[in-house]
Image: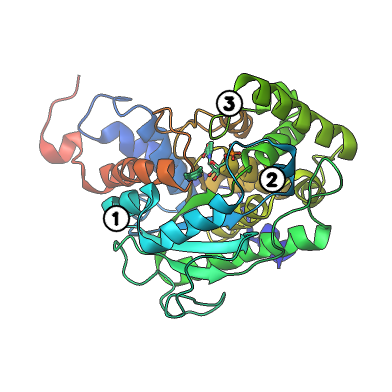
Amino acid sequence: MLEDTIAAVGPPDEAAMTAARQLQARLTKPAGSLGDLEELSVRLAGLAGSCPPPVPGSAAVAIFAGDHGVHAQRVSPWPQEVTGQMVGNFLAGGAVVNAFARQAGASMTVIDVGVASPLPVADPVNAVGVGDPDGALGRATGSGIPRLISAPIRRGTRDMTVTAALTREEARAAVEVGIDIAGELIAAGAGILLTGDMGIANTTPAAALIAAFTGVDAAEATGRGTGVDDPTYQHKIEVVRAALRRHSPDPADPLGVLAAVGGLEHAALTGFVLGAAARRVPVLLDGVIAGSAALAAAAFAPDCVAAIVAGHRSAEPGAAVALRQLGLTPLIDLGLRLGEGTGALLALPVVTGAVRVLHEVATFDSAGVAEK
Ligand SMILES: O=C(O)c1ccc[n+]([C@@H]2O[C@H](COP(=O)([O-])O)[C@@H](O)[C@H]2O)c1
Ligand SMILES: Cc1cc2nc[nH]c2cc1C
């Protein structure tokens, strides 16, 4: 399934992109006055293979949750149990991502790909298995109440400073969960997918993935995550460096990189990006965890970048490193470093606005406005 998905990822449609550029030049506004939104509209036309591309109607945010063996190295100030407790908060509707999903009118899906602690909320009505087509866009789009999909590969990764975080089979299984979820959400009508993540300590594997795929030093890829102090930050850089030294991951072997120094949510998000790209549906990235997964997706299928929109620039330094390597410009830069999908949700109206312009704005000819 991974190979089929990779094979289905194709390049953007140049004719549709040319048509979008020509249309932009005829709209009643000074050329270039919509800044980055103009190129965004061109990219989305290329992805859809039509000008104008469809206005992304239903938006779906998928929050992949997992735990991390490297937490034992004291790289996060938070106890590991917070991952499962925050999943409980998502299911109850009480997290920031719930508020932003309500505001954006996005459906929410939480996918447990490897939370170590038992989830505090067991709601059988809300529990839907992977592949179940019923209610694939959640209970009610815009309610801010997610459905939960339980698809654990294992209850947390192994400590990457000691051994590979995952086996290749586990990494592949997690990638395929992400592909599955993307396919299911698109089949249920989603016109744009948004990434979300929850996993205490997951900025450490994200930094290791970014260093492995871009070649930057561990110090450049590593940030303070939820907010570690100076000594812990220095130690976190050394943990990332030690994991990279131990495994020497080969960036040409993305499954090997994900297995050695990745995480279950990172691998699932990789599949989520590939699944969206294979179906030519845009995927709006959140922060540094999504950025690290997008690098893995691009290593599997370079053309998938055409489907990716960078929602925001996370304060985590590795996020900017990842976006630079992918050649993507973030839409908003508010110093966010929460995760969950919050930055992607805030960027959603920017994406919709960019496409609406191509549908709704008059041309100089049609409106009778004089040109310069
Ligand atoms: O999205 C981001 O760029 C981001 C930056 C810093 C932290 N986070 C979130 O915080 C958690 C990981 O932080 P940490 O310090 O435990 O590695 C995890 O749940 C992420 O969703 C997310
Ligand atoms: C409270 C809390 C909420 C989060 N949301 C995403 N990562 C998080 C990490 C913590 C610690």
* Circle 1 SS class: helix
Q: Amino acid at mark 2?
A: Ala
Could you tell me which residue is drawn at 42 percent across and 57 percent down?
A: 89
Mark nearer the viewer, 2 or 1: 1
Neighbours of disc 3 within 10 Å: few (<14), some (14-19), many (20+)? some
Label 1 lies in ligand 2 vicinity (Cβ under 8 Å): no
Across and down, in percent, residue 127 comes to 49, 76
Quickly name the residue at label 3: 317
Instruction: Give me the C-alpha separation between circle 1 and circle 3.
Output: 29 Å
Instruction: Give me the C-alpha separation between circle 2 and circle 1.
Output: 30 Å
In the picture, the quarter occupied by the N terminus is: bottom right
Kindly indicate whether the residue at mark 3 contacts the one at mark 1 (C-beta within 8 angstroms): no
Task: Give the quarter of the image for residue 72.
Answer: top right
Quickly name the residue at label 2: 296
Going from N to C along the chain, the mark reached first, 3 or 2, is 2
Q: Nearer the viewer, residue 252 or 85?
A: 85
Q: Amino acid at mark 3?
A: Pro
Marking on residue 172: none
Could you tell me which residue is drawn at 29 percent across and 63 percent down?
A: 143
- The reply, left or right, for residue 273 in relation to residue 237 is left
Quickly name the residue at label 1: 102
